[in-house]
Image (cartoon, grey):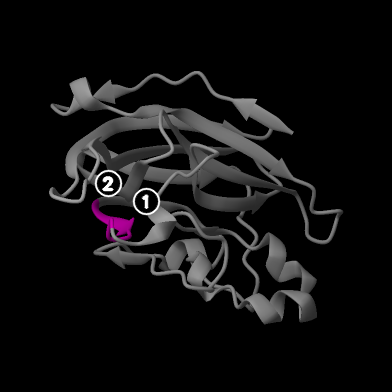
Amino acid sequence: MKKFLTLALLLSSFGAFAQFDGLLVEEVDNQGTVPGKTYRIYVQVKNSFDYLTAVYGFKDNKLSITSTKPFFQSAYGGAMANSVVRRTVNEKPELKYDSWVTIGYADNYQNAVNSFLISFDAFETGGNLETTDGAWYVTPDQQQSKAGAAKKILIGQFTSEGVITGIVNLQGRTVTKPSTADTKAEWETWEVKDVNFTCGE
């Protein structure tokens, strides 16, 4: 199931260059393997060569991902997708529907996602994920930050029996001038704040 969300958002000072085209929520059929429903959240952008580098909360622009019932957290995973060991998914089917955050990739294979000043302690035990001074991110040289032909970048998977709501802030970059044999590519930073989503009834 795919659902494109109409979003109320506030563009930052980079707004004239914003490549953000919305958030996409996709429901994953977890076949009743775990309690509740599983959703993946994607950032949609305008071009295949657009990049997402950070999902963050800061000062007046809080990051908050909450549910009315606990998030499902597998004992074999972690709060970030690079804790999902690909070979273990086949041995522990519940791990496939673990709740985690990421940029681009859904497991540990070549996944360079990292975090900065953000606590996942509550989230890892089924609680909410909130920060006013932290982020998860990748550097723009990582292939996983690029949208590619689908023009979308995965930022999280969440499983819960409750209603999931979130507010995130996003930063990325886009190519304004492709590289040539004689010149390097030129980039422009884009940023959007206070982007909302809801999953569930």
Residue 3 visible to an observer of this rendering: yes
The answer to whether mark 1 and mark 2 are in CB contact below 8 A is: yes
Residue displayed at 41% across by 28% down = 46
The quarter of the displayed image where residue 195 is located: top left
Residue pictured at 45% horizontal, 44% vertical? 147
Q: Residue 57 carries which label?
A: 2
Q: Residue furthest front?
A: 181
Asked whether, in this view, residue 163 is left or right of residue 81, the answer is: right
Return the residue at label 1: 130
Q: Residue furthest right?
A: 31
- What span is colored magenta in the figure? 133-140
Residue 45: x and y in percent read 42, 32
Residue at image position (78%, 56%) is 35
Residue 46 among magenta residues:
no
Q: Is residue 201 visible?
A: no
Three-letter amino acid code at disc 1? Answer: Glu
- Residue in front for this viewpoint, 113 or 66: 113
